[in-house]
Amino acid sequence: MPSSYRTPSDIHPSLVYDDAPAAIEWLCRAFGFTRRLVVPGEKGTIRHSELSLGTGVIMVSSTRLAEGRVSPRRLQGGTAHGLSVWVGDPDAHHQRAVAAGARIVRPLRDEPHGARGYMAEDIEGHLWYFGDYRPGAHWEETPEST
């Protein structure tokens, strides 16, 4: 029976992988995501999935060539600079990712804007920034509530 719970997150990135089942396993092991929903597709593919980390949620699915949805490893570059994810302990998170074999593309460091974090590439080329920064600290005004 479905839960009545709904995430408070308002943005839910959707990522595409050639081997979505392997990517889901790796994202959970290396970055600490929790598998919440997996909808299988044909021939071992993933039609839709939802993984959470804190209050954030990403959706992962398999490549769908007919829809133009492909993994970054099929492209000359990524479709976005990367995903930024808040973690309470960037040092511990970095250690976990390194232990799981994540490719670190920018080392753990203190950032000029007051954050501490690092950047890693996942098994198919998506870029991830994990750090203790939450947007809004440097905004000049508070956004209006909707």
Image: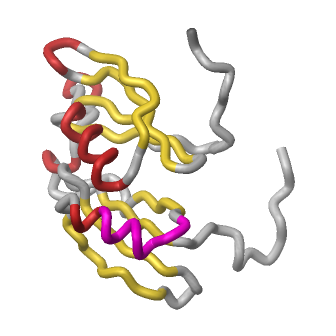
The residue under the point 39% across, 51% down is 32
Q: How is the image coloured?
A: secondary structure
When asked about the image quadrant of residue 16, the answer is top left
**Residue 94 point in image, percent of width and height:** 34, 70
**Residue 122 point in image, percent of width and height:** 24, 55
Q: Which residues are magenta?
A: 88-96
In the displayed structure, 87 sits above or below 48; it is: below
**Residue 39 point in image, percent of width and height:** 36, 18
In the displayed structure, 128 sits above or below 64; it is: below
When asked about the image quadrant of residue 95, the answer is bottom left
* Magenta span contains residue 22: no
- Seen from the viewer's position, the closer of residues 122 and 13 is 122
Total marks in image: 0
- Seen from the viewer's position, the closer of residues 116 and 45 is 116
**Taking 104 as reference, is 108 left or right?**
right
Question: Which quarter of the rendered picture does the C terminus lie within?
Answer: top right
**Residue 132 point in image, percent of width and height:** 55, 72
In the displayed structure, 94 sits above or below 121; it is: below
Question: Which quarter of the rendered picture does the N terminus lie within?
Answer: top right
The residue under the point 43% across, 66% down is 130
- Seen from the viewer's position, the closer of residues 116 and 70 is 116
Secondary structure that dominates the magenta span: helix
